């Protein structure tokens, strides 16, 4: 058995949640005030994900980009290898897809800045 302590970030309350795992299976979740906190703690304990924000080379400047949804945290270095080899040429508009389906689950990397 293992215990994970998580501070929920879904809302401003910041519930301190304890998740008890037995061989990777959730046995109990305690400390959440709402159902959203319970789901957050469950996801965070078993398969944490993060929205990725970074930059891509666009000629002489750097283009800020982000993922359209949260990506698996344990694969961030793989995603960054792909992003670091990507070069973009203008014009680019906010929301343009820079890398399509980076994770094989439909998450794109999009521009968050305009470049002429």
Image (cartoon, rainbow, N blue to C red):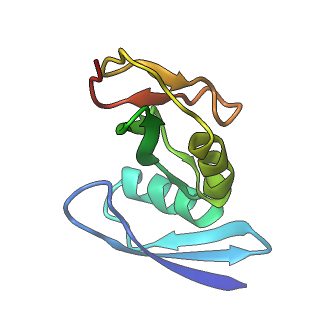
Instruction: Please tell me which residue is depicted at 35% across the width and 14% down the height of the picture.
Output: 91
Q: Give above or below for 63 relative to 50.
A: above
Residue at x-position 42% and y-position 44%: 55
61 or 6: nearer the viewer: 61
Residue 10 is situated, as x and y percent measured from the top left of the image, at 32, 54
Front residue of 4 and 100: 100
Q: Is residue 44 left or right of residue 7?
A: right
Locate the C terminus by quadrant.
Answer: top left
**What number of labels is visible?**
0
Vertical placement of 55 versus 104: above or below? below
Position of 28 with respect to 50 (left or right) is: right
Q: Quadrant of residue 113?
A: top left
At 36% from the left edge and 18% from the top edge, which residue is drawn? 92
Q: In the rendering, at what x and y percent does residue 59 appear? A: 43, 32
Q: Is residue 106 above or below residue 6?
A: above
Residue 27 x, y percent position in the rendering: 66, 71
Q: Which residue in the rendered view is the most extreme toward the left?
A: 12
Q: Nearer the viewer, residue 58 or 51?
A: 58
Residue 12 sits above or below residue 115 on the image: below
Along the viewing direction, whichever of 68 and 111 lies nearer the viewer: 111
Q: Position of residue 8 (x, y in %)?
A: 36, 65
The residue most toward the front is 60
Which part of the image, by quadrant, shows the N terminus?
Answer: bottom right
At x 50% / y 43%, what residue is drawn?
A: 70
């Amino acid at each position: 058995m293992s215990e994970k302590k998580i501070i929920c970030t879904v809302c401003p309350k910041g519930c301190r949640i304890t998740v008890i795992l037995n061989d990777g299976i959730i046995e109990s979740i305690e400390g959440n005030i709402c159902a959203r906190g319970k789901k957050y703690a469950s996801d965070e304990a078993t398969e944490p994900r993060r929205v990725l924000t970074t930059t891509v080379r666009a000629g002489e400047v750097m283009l800020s980009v982000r993922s359209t949804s949260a990506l698996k945290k344990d694969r961030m270095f793989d995603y960054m290898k792909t992003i670091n080899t990507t070069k973009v040429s203008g014009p680019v508009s906010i929301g343009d897809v820079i890398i399509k389906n980076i994770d094989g689950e439909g998450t794109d990397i999009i521009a968050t800045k305009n470049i002429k």
